[in-house]
Amino acid sequence: MAGHSKWANIQHRKGRQDKLRSKLFSKLAKEITVAAKMGDPDPDKNPRLRLAVKEAKSQSVPKDVIDRAIKKSQGGDAENYDEIRYEGYGPGGVAVIVETMTDNKNRTASTVRSTFSKNGGNLGETGSVGFMFDRKGQVMYPASVGDADTVMMAAIEAGAEDCESSEDGHVIICADTDLNTVATALEAELGESESTKLIWQPTTTTELDLDGMTKLMKLIDALEDDDDVQTVTANFEASDEVMNQL
């Protein structure tokens, strides 16, 4: 999991940047609309929607934005989004998974492909890097909720598979199908989480130096800047020294 907590911390740090805030809100709202349209508009009866709303709240998305996104799913004018996953290699041979929601497949495919090629990567076929990741559930808590032992015990009792604690916080990992159950149990024990979502957890990582990390972050930033892109995950590994210089 070593590379993963670093990845989570980068996402966390980047997530607080104002320039990404409005984009993040619209991406979370899109996920809420799609989840509500695919299932029940009541979060209590729709696990995917419940998780989407929970994640939106943890990122301080206003309640009226969340309600509007759910309402939009019930209207006849709600866009139809296709969920498409792209896989490829970034600078230094790092495996990258890009998850998108789009109302125009051709536009998204073209943009993602050109973003990879302009930033030292190349788009592969579906499945070309997916085998290097496991689909998992991830729940994040701030360090202030308790010490490592307390959180580890809560995670075990909730049915989680792993828990990694550091001064940056606690990252709890569970099976993807158990995320709703584990998150609910943790909430009863530890309170509201900072983040609850499905992730791609690398099973193998690629070590990058500062130059490689700088190039990779440029690719990730360019991909995340696309309104059709929901999430970007990469299987990099980097030393603390390199991470601190980014």
Image: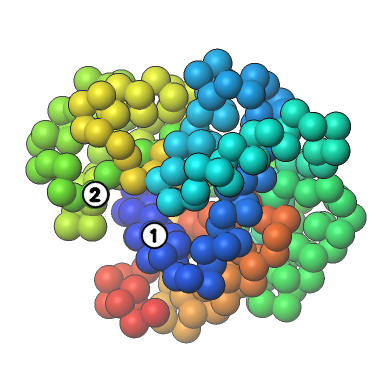
| Rendered view: 126 above or below 5 | above
| Image spot of residue 17 (x, y percent) | 45, 70
Residue type pointed to by label 1: His
x and y percent of residue 212 in the render? 49, 78
Instruction: Examine the rendered structure and indicate whether residue 60 appears above or below residue 112.
Output: above
Give the crowd class for mark 1: few <14, some 14-19, many >=20 residues within 10 Å: some
The residue at which mark 1 appears reads as 12
Q: Is residue 144 left or right of residue 241?
A: left
Q: Residue at x 58, y 71 (%)?
A: 221
In this view, the residue in front, 238 or 154, is 154
Q: Position of residue 73 (x, y in %)?
A: 73, 33
Residue 224 position by quadrant: bottom right
Relative placement, left or right, of 215 versus 229 is left
Residue 156 visible in the picture: no
Q: Looking at the image, which is closer to me, 159 or 236?
A: 159
Residue 207 quadrant: bottom left
Q: Which residue is mark 2?
A: 142
Q: Is 123 placed above or below 64 here?
A: below
Residue 52: numbered disc: none
Q: Secondary structure at mark 2?
A: loop
SS assignment at label 1: helix
Identify the residue shown where x is 64% and y is 68%. Answer: 225
Name the residue: 73% across, 78% down. 118
Q: Earlier in the sequence, mark 2 or mark 1?
A: 1
**Could you classify mark 2 by the number of other residues whose Cα lies within 10 Å: few (under 14), some (14-19), or many (20 or more)?**
some
